[in-house]
Image: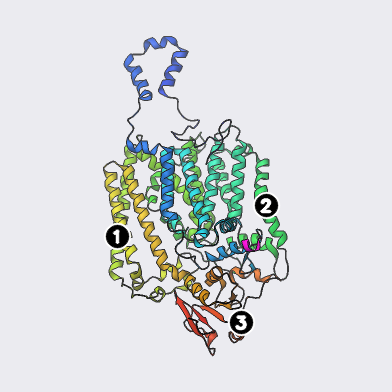
Amino acid sequence: MCFPQGGRGLRAWDGGGAPLGRGRAPSPHSRIMKNFAMNPSAARHYEPPAIKRMIQPSMTGPTTTRPQRLLSDWRISVLVLIALWAVIYMAGLSRPPLLDDVDTVHAEAAREMLQRNDWVTLYTDGIRYLEKAPLTYWSLAVSYRIFGVSDWSTRLPLALGVLGLFFATYQAGRYVFGEAGGLYAGVVLATALGLYIFTRFLIPDVLVGLWLTVGYYLFLRSLEEERPSRLVCWGFAATCALNVLTKGLIGLVFPVGAIGLYLLVTGNLRHLLKLRLVSSTLVFFAIAAPWHVLAALRNPAQGGARGFLWFYFINEHVMRFLNKRVPPGYDTVPLAIFWGLLLVWLLPWSAFLPQALRDVPVRWRELRSKLDRRQRASLLFLLWVLVIVGFFSFSTRQEYYTISGLPGMALLVGGWLARESGPEASESDRRAGRISSIVLFIFGVLGFAAGIYLLSVSHTAAPGADLADLLKKNPQDYDFSLGHVLDLTPRALGAFRGPLLGASLGLLLGTGLNFMLRRRGRPFEGNIALAVMMVGLLACVHYSFCTFSPVLSSYNLAEAIQKQFRPGDVIVIDGQYHQASTLNFYTGVQVRVLHEPSGNLWYGAKFPDAPHIFETPESLAALWKGPAEVFLWTDQDNPKELRGLTSFLLARSGGKSIYSSRPPRD
């Protein structure tokens, strides 16, 4: 992120040294010079030892250690973040196959966008899909146009967004906490558990975090400018607009809420008048408004549909917040678990969060005084997180809804880690680091013990066994993002023995090494141990995800159909579209749905031009006896719709099957 120099603009890579807030005290050397200038005779009364004591620190300074030299070089910081991104996020770009629902519903909408050359109205399986903001789909469609349609080109835009988030977090941390603080904040985010888990799916929350990070960074810059520059003000407005195009109105609610609270508690609401409100508002609407206007014009009320505006703003924003969305399709994580998961997603670095929060000013007198840069930023970062979790505390909520707040937590932790590792660290800082390392080591020992116990009760799966046959299904939990994890049984764990052993050993060794290094006063090396541990743990997570993917994806069944499919054949999903949307994406064929309009297709099916894709048991029987071959996807062992009909089992994978109306061809 580079900005032009000069004037009130932003300088490229600013903030390499200590923060230069207006509250910075003058150096001892400058105080002496000022004293001499005002009172020349005073120089005669200074004893040489006194002068030497006052000037010496500014002339020589403390000895710089090798870790400090490494942490002060921006080139090393950039290389470290790129390396972590490449190893953690790019290595698995092509595996596993895309998943049903959360992946291929979105990927199919982007593919049809490119196919139709319609960049305004989203379609999936030929039916209007109006519930989502477009920016994610635009990025996917551009990737498909450049690289073709594939698994890796589907995941590439999100991976690039992750890299952008790392650099935005690094730049914000560098501006506030110095070079070391920026690097630590980026490393914390790059190796955090939650960010990795929820970039395994095509959800836009990471991009929401990116725009929030850039926007808050620009706002912090504005606080130090007497008259904030156009670049700062218009840049902030642009990030809000891009966020609205990424995930709807929360892209505006979150930054306005956090910044509004910040200005309110600091008694600085007048600062709003400095932000070029008129021109910034015009910039916001110039970016955010055109798509909304075009979508409303191209999707007016017609037939049984009330148009784009009602569905997108009322049903998908207001009614979803009130948990009255039609049709219901989202369960709600219990509130205590939702707040607790915020700490889980930042592991292992959340162990350092308590001491990082000490930098946040909380006393009323302190809030109303002139805060320095670190205090201002720490307060804003905390409000950033609290606004997000507070908002969803009164709404429907999924496990991943706090992901866009992780950069704020990473910045708080990164700033503290930089101080603990630096020469200015106090004994209380080092002691707090040792206490956190003890907590992490206890967690590592418990994790190791739990992992070894699970290994002892697990059973090696028979060669060729279908993992789905070893699971205990809990469909009541599948509305949660990680609901399928609750299906695991001791028999199923046998398929994960390798990553389970690797994760157990990694936890023990990583937290143990961190504890020993911090006890010896080497926090820099301790942080390296934790980062390396997380690289290994996330590799185990990826391996497990690949093993589990046949349960979550119908890719293997799509391949089986493609080997038999001929033009004119029909694919039918026995259930809702999203349960087997992979078939639509990988075959490129419009699928039929043996279900009443529901889920993703419910509203689009109300438009008069919606294609006929919904079948009944009677119409399926007629198709089955017709001239075209019919392929039926089902998650039932003996689907009742095929009783009395001649059928052939074509393939089975992940607890799902494909039956055909014709015998398989060799």
Q: Amino acid at mark 3?
A: Thr
Residue highlighted by disc 1 = 448
At x 51% / y 43%, what residue is drawn?
A: 380
Confirm whether residue 594 shows in the render.
no
Query: What is the residue that sits farthest to the front in this orientation?
Result: 666
Q: CA distance from mark 1 to mark 3?
A: 52 Å
Q: Position of residue 505 (x, y in %)?
A: 29, 58
What secondary structure do most residues of the magenta stretch adopt?
Answer: helix
Residue highlighted by disc 3 = 616
Element under disc 1: helix
Say whether residue 116 is magenta: yes
- First in sequence: mark 1 or mark 2? 2
Q: Position of residue 573 (x, y in %)?
A: 55, 76
Residue 50 against residue 574 in the figure, above or below? above
At x 40% / y 67%, what residue is drawn?
A: 547
- Callout 2–callout 3 Cβ contact below 8 Å: no
- First in sequence: mark 2 or mark 3? 2
**Span of residues in magenta:** 113-117
Q: Position of residue 123 (x, y in %)?
A: 63, 65
Residue 441 against residue 98 in the figure, above or below? above
Q: Amino acid at mark 2?
A: Ala
Viewer-nearest residue: 310 or 556 = 556
**Which disc, if any, is residue 289?**
2
- First in sequence: mark 1 or mark 3? 1
